[in-house]
Amino acid sequence: MATIQLGPYSSPNVVLSTELNSLAATTGKAISAGLDNGSLLNLWADLELSVNFAVAPTAGTVVELYLLPSIDAGVTFPDGGTSVLPQSSLYVAGFVVRAVTGLQVMVVRGVVLPPGDYKYLVQNTTNKAFPASGSTVREATYQMQSV
């Protein structure tokens, strides 16, 4: 009988970079380009936020992560953008920051992926703006495999 286990990560893919430049404190939002999971049909993604705050944010504040699935092959996506927060049911998780300057790298694990196109949206609810450049959100996808 075969054993079912997690497969390996895909190569990490940068899904947000320049969109995060100078992302405003409290309500700043950034949205990724569309991503396609229609052929690979990965089940999950782990996401990594890398940010280097110039001024320390308050410990425990959050950069929120939303996933916006398209049910029609990328033609239409749920409401959400740089001025509109998605519906609360599309909230995936939050990257909880520390009260430090310098590089912070945080990971969200096990985000369930749709079997088609999707986008990510982040909202900076910390009390400090992102730096002018250098912040990223990377995604590594994975699935089950039989061995």
Image (spheres, rainbow, N blue to C red):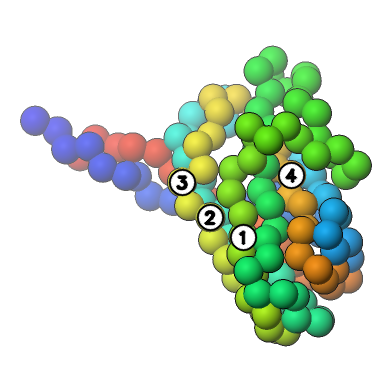
Task: Kindly identify the amino acid type of the residue bearing the numbered disc 4.
Answer: Leu
- Which numbered dot is residue 95? 1
Q: Which-is-in-front pick, marks 3 and 1?
A: 1
What residue lies at 67% left-to-right and 61% top-to-bottom? 62
Circle 1 sits in a helix, a strand or a loop, which is it? strand
Q: Earlier in the sequence, mark 4 or mark 3?
A: 3
| Residue under the image location 80 percent in, 39 percent down | 85
Q: Which label belongs to residue 110?
A: 3
Instruction: Return the x and y of residue 48 as percentages of the image width and height.
Output: 59, 60
Residue 93 x/y as whole percent? 58, 49
Between 69 and 95, the residue placed more toward the observer is 95
Q: Secondary structure at mark 3?
A: strand
Mark 4 surroundings within 10 Å by alpha-carbon count, few (fewer than 14), some (14 through 19), many (20 or more) = many
The answer to which of marks 2 and 4 sits earlier in the sequence is: 2
Q: Which quadrant does the C terminus fall into?
A: top left
- Which residue is under mark 4? 121
Viewer-side residue, 86 vs 67: 86
For disc 2, the marked residue is 108
The Cα atoms of the two marked residues, 3 and 1, are separated by 13 Å
